[in-house]
Image (cartoon, rainbow, N blue to C red):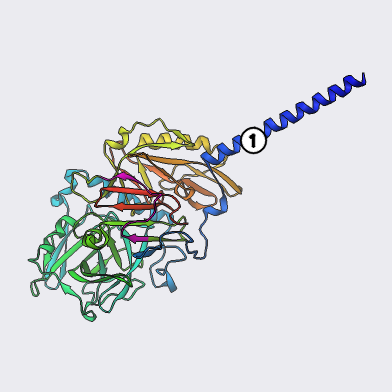
């Protein structure tokens, strides 16, 4: 009897140990799966800090500029109230809608014909420039800026950078029409020894029409070329098309750089001195500096508005970057196209036909905030994401977003992993700030939106690009993506 009890006891222990190790191994497998297919983060990390934090990663190559969010604590644009008030999330997203409307309209032949637009005439130096009141590119809210030098001696200027724009411009004295408030001293060409106006008869002047979709004007007195550009929110800039010395870094200068010297600048530009155009057009920064930087640039946008990213000109030394092709659009405009094949969630390919992306095409754009997807694609992604977030309480929709959560009582968060699959075997893994848009801890939303129709252009926005090193090899016709480019 004692032997039977002892034997039973030993068997029981063996069974318990077997179950213990089995469950332990099963838990380890489950944990590994969770880590591989979910992002495990603290909810507090979704909120930006009130203090500026420089990135401990990122490019330290020669021709590199700091990238700063316009409304974050690292920004100089809101210093001492010199700039206009900061936009709300609603403002940023509403203006993002306007930008998308314009980008989509570029694909319609009727929108490229401005004959039906009401024209507004702006007088300058006894001459005039005609600006269309419609079909204009929104300046881009919630975006990023860099600081460059202009003139001899140089004056530092904070310029928003935009891959969807071509013309670089800044406000100039004497502000013959009007100048909005900016944090930097307004550039005065009369104090620079390297400034020159471009004449109306110059081939450079004739390039403005294809870059801005607005016919250039001509000064009757000086025969200087006059540019005009209007943005979707009604903002505009008119002035002299000029050449000047541009200082990128203390060791990198560009002679005779073509830019707009704005004399009449009105609208909601919020503190920046103008714009740095990184499109494909011949007058863009990329093309003007092709001999120096080989038509190549890269950037990394920080994970939150309290971080610092970078914009680098020239080739990258990051061997972890994977490249996908970026064909030039047949319509001639200068957006950067990418070929999206599909989306994965939790490591599983979503049931989406690649034709939904290829029918209208897809671009990557630094000035668009939120990625726009075909409605069929968005619905599939949203429904799958909601299943993966079913344990978290829902919150009210907000602006563009119909899928929001109240995470105010949640400390540790498990977010389904979302990857974009591109041509060439490239997989772009989004970080948590590229998946969730945080209004507050009580309203955290899936950071995607649907287009009006499946036939509309897909736009890969800057929220989804956060912390990635995005490389534009324009000469090579390709775009690269590398993870952990910056914090």
In the structure shown, which secondary structural element does the residue marked by tag 1 occupy?
helix
Q: Can you give x and y, in whole percent of width and height, for residue 216 in the image?
A: 13, 62
User: In the drawing, does residue 77 fall left or right of residue 169?
Assistant: right
Number of marks in the rendered image: 1
Q: Nearer the viewer, residue 3 or 253?
A: 3
Q: On the rendered image, what quadrant is the N terminus found in? A: top right
Would you call the spot at circle 1 few (<14 residues within 10 Å), some (14-19), or many (20 or more)? few
The answer to whether residue 305 shows anywhere in this view is: yes
Residue at x 18%, y 45% (from the top left corner):
331
Q: Can you give x and y, in whole percent of width and height, for residue 343 in the image?
A: 40, 37
Q: Nearer the viewer, residue 333 or 439?
A: 333
Q: Is residue 414 above or below residue 88?
A: above
Based on the picture, tell me whether residue 316 belongs to the magenta stretch. yes
In this figure, which residue is indicated by the disc labeled 1? 27
Q: Can you give x and y, in whole percent of width and height, for residue 276 in the image?
A: 28, 62
Q: Nearer the viewer, residue 17 or 383?
A: 17
Q: Nearer the viewer, residue 229 or 485?
A: 485
The answer to whether residue 212 shows anywhere in this view is: no
Residues drawn in magenta? 311-326
Q: Is residue 191 above or below residue 270?
A: below
Q: Is residue 181 above or below residue 292?
A: below
Q: Can you give x and y, in whole percent of width and height, for residue 23 in the image?
A: 68, 32
Residue at x 49%, y 61% (from the top left corner):
56
């Amino acid at each position: 009897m004692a032997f039977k009890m002892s034997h039973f006891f030993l068997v029981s222990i063996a069974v318990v140990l077997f179950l213990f190790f089995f469950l332990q191994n099963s838990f380890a497998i489950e944990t590994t799966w969770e880590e591989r297919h979910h992002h495990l983060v603290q909810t507090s990390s979704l909120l930006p800090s009130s203090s500026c934090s420089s990135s401990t990663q990122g490019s330290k190559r020669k021709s590199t500029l700091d990238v700063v969010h316009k409304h974050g604590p690292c920004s100089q644009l809101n210093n001492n109230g010199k700039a206009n008030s900061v936009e709300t999330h609603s403002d940023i997203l509403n203006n993002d809608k306007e930008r998308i409307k314009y980008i989509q309209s570029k694909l319609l032949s009727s929108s490229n014909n401005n004959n039906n637009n009401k024209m507004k005439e702006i007088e300058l130096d006894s001459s005039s420039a005609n600006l269309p009141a419609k079909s204009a590119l929104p300046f881009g809210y919630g975006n990023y800026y860099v600081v460059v030098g202009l003139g001899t001696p140089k004056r530092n200027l904070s310029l928003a950078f935009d891959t969807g724009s071509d013309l670089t411009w800044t406000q100039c004295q004497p502000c013959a029409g009007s100048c909005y408030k900016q944090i930097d001293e307004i550039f005065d060409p009369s104090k620079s020894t390297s400034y020159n106006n471009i004449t109306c008869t110059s081939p450079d002047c004739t390039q403005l029409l294809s870059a801005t979709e607005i016919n250039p004007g001509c000064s009757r007195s000086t025969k200087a070329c006059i540019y005009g550009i209007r943005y979707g929110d009604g903002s505009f800039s008119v002035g002299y098309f000029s050449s000047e010395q541009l200082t990128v870094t203390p060791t990198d200068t560009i002679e005779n750089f073509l830019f707009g010297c704005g004399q009449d600048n009105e609208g909601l530009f919020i503190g920046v001195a103008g714009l740095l155009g990184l499109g494909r057009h011949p007058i863009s920064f990329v093309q003007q500096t092709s001999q120096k930087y080989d038509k190549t640039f890269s950037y990394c946008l920080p994970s939150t508005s309290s971080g610092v990213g970078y914009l680098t000109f020239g080739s990258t030394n990051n061997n972890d970057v994977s490249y996908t092709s970026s064909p030039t659009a047949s319509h001639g405009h200068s957006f950067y196209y990418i070929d999206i094949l599909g989306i994965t969630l939790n490591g599983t390919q979503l049931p989406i036909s690649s034709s939904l992306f290829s029918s209208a095409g897809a671009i990557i754009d630094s000035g668009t905030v939120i990625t726009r997807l075909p409605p069929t694609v968005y619905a599939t992604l949203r429904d799958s994401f909601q299943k993966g977030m079913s344990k978290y309480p829902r919150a009210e929709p907000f602006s563009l977003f119909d899928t929001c959560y109240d995470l105010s009582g949640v400390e540790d968060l498990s977010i389904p992993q979302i990857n974009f699959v591109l041509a060439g075997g490239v997989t772009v893994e989004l970080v948590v700030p590229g998946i969730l848009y945080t209004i507050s801890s009580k309203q955290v939303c899936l950071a995607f939106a649907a287009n009006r129709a499946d036939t509309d252009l897909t736009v890969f926005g800057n929220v989804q690009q956060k912390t990635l090193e995005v490389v534009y090899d324009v000469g090579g016709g390709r775009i690269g993506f590398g993870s952990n480019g910056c914090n």
